Image: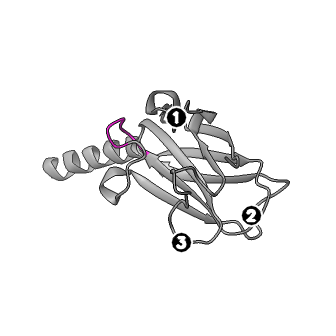
Amino acid sequence: MKIAFACLLTLTSTFSTLAATLTVEVHDIKSTKGDIVVTVYNSSKTWLEDGKKNIVKQHVVNLKDKVIEGVLITQIELPEGEYALQIYQDWDQNKEMDSNWIGMPKEPVATSNNAKGSMGPPSYKDAKFTLSESGTTQIVNIVDI
């Protein structure tokens, strides 16, 4: 009985600290075509790297009937911790950010903290934020590059 109670107590305390709500507000959406793709990273080593092993979570929202006055609001459940977001509007819904021959995005993009790069993508250091137990909101402006 004591072992069962200890296990239950451990599970309860573990689950209560596992999930926190990240609210993402994407502003300046000019078209409701396609999806918004929010890719969540938690390391500078994997930041903006392709492949499922490099990302924490990918959250896809179809824009139809979800954008109000150019703004989409969505929520993602994640463990508390440090994260950075890459966001893009997947116009053709091919599940990848389309780019030109030199790697510049052809679809609208944003990053957490509205971090901007200089002669390339923004750094993880500039895009990172902390998700606390009480939740966090990231407000980003999506732009055409």
- Read off the residue under disc 3: 94
The part of the chain drawn in magenta is 41-46
> Disc 3 marks which amino acid?
Asn
- Read off the residue under disc 2: 66
Residue at the extreme top of the image, as rendered? 125
* Cα distance in 3D space between marks 1 and 3: 24 Å
* Residues at circles 2 and 3 in contact by the CB criterion of under 8 Å: no
Point out the tag, 1 or 3, that comes first from the N-terminus: 3
* Residues at circles 2 and 1 in contact by the CB criterion of under 8 Å: no
User: With 14 as the anchor, is 103 left or right in this view?
Assistant: right
Dominant secondary-structure state across the stretch colored magenta: loop
x 15%, y 47%: residue: 2
Q: Identify which residue, 10 or 136, lies in the foreground.
A: 136
Point out the tag, 2 or 1, that comes first from the N-terminus: 2
* Cα distance in 3D space between marks 2 and 3: 20 Å
**Magenta-drawn stretch contains 83:** no
